Image (cartoon, helix red, strand yellow):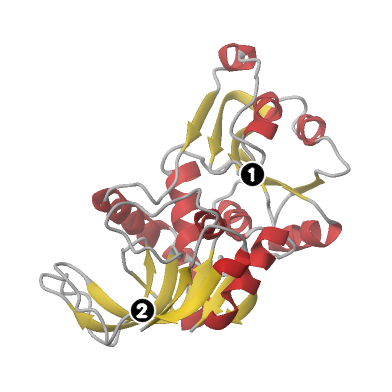
Amino acid sequence: MRAVVIARAGGPEVLEERDVGEGLPPPGEGEVLVGVSAAGVNRADTVQRQGRYPAPPGASPYPGLECSGTILALGPNVPSRWAVGDQVVVPAGQLLPVPEGVSLTDAAGLPEVACTVWSTVFMTSHLSPGESFLIHGGSSGIGTFAIQIAKHLGIKVFVTAGSEEKLAACKGLGADVCINYKTEDFVARVKEETNGKGVDVILDNIGGLYLQRNLNSLAVDGRLFIIGFQGGAVTEVNLQPMLARRLTIQAAGLRNRSLDNKALIVSEVEKNVWPAVVQGKVKPVIYKTFPLSEAAEAHKLMEESSHIGKILLIP
């Protein structure tokens, strides 16, 4: 069996494709063995490579949060809906069937983004039809998915991105208001577009650098959901807007959740998101694929942030 191994904490060059054992591991209780067809690359993988996001106890030490493939073997007490030969996608140890009309390779770009967006702004922040939604990093894998599912559900979508090419891609996916954060003040633009009200929900991957501006961009009863700290985790903030407008700050990831909680999220995604994918209303946006041996190049591309959509590795 071959895998991408983190030889030591550091830059992309520390990634090595290696043989990591003779034969295939037998699936344990409630587990399935999946022959991987493609794997998604996520920013969390780059942070793990740097030594700042260790795998949870008992989890695989190899970087990677999602893949697609075919079931090769079943362990004891696997639900009867699954069989050897099924084409599946695997987010955080849970199975989803590959949606009809989506290739097995492209399906690898769906689990992490679908589970992240649905569990945060929909299951937790309760973003609802008729509301407004600001997505930072609209051209990212998470952003391109969030635009599509929100528009499908009748939500007005605002995005920020750092180039006209990225903004055009967001517009093509359905974003209503596209803001170049390098040349525009997103707070002022949001207020202008909402007649001073602000947006109802913000999905933020920046953290500290944007915290005050995000609070200033929210409407009464607005919700800010933080999923990353690309702009730092420490800042000074004026909390007065929270009290004045009944604002809520929420934050979460997927990796450290219990297996039961992950299973609940996957079930909700299959029920609420997969039909939209089958209908063609939400599509995986794949920017580039790399062979497994070029995982370092995939990480470099992720860290350059020049991509639009998802980056995949192909074994």
Residue at image coords 41%, 57%:
272
Q: Which residue is mark 2?
A: 20
Q: Give the residue furthest to the front.
A: 8
Q: Residue 309's quadrant in the figure?
A: bottom right
- Which badge, 2 or 1, is on the more N-terminal residue? 2
Left or right of 54 on screen, residue 310? right
- Total marks shown come to 2
Residue 218 position within the rendered picture, expressed as x and y whole percent measured from the top left: 65, 28
Q: Measure how far apart labels 2 and 1 are at the Cα level.
A: 32 Å
Of the numbered discs in the image, which one, if any, rests on residue 230? 1
Residue 178 position within the rendered picture, expressed as x and y whole percent measured from the top left: 78, 49
Q: Give the residue furthest to the left.
A: 76
Asked which secondary structure carries label 1, the reply is: loop
Is 256 drawn above or below residue 149 in the view shown? above
Left or right of 158 on screen, residue 128? left
Pointer 1 local density, CA inside 10 Å: few below 14, some 14–19, many at least 20: some
Front in this rendered view, residue 75 or 193 = 75
Q: Identify residue type, mark 2.
A: Val
Residue at image coords 26%, 53%:
259
Is 151 drawn above or below residue 217 in the view shown? below
Asked which secondary structure carries label 2, the reply is: loop
Pointer 2 local density, CA inside 10 Å: few below 14, some 14–19, many at least 20: few
Q: Residue 195's quadrant in the figure?
A: top right
Q: Identify residue type, mark 1.
A: Gln
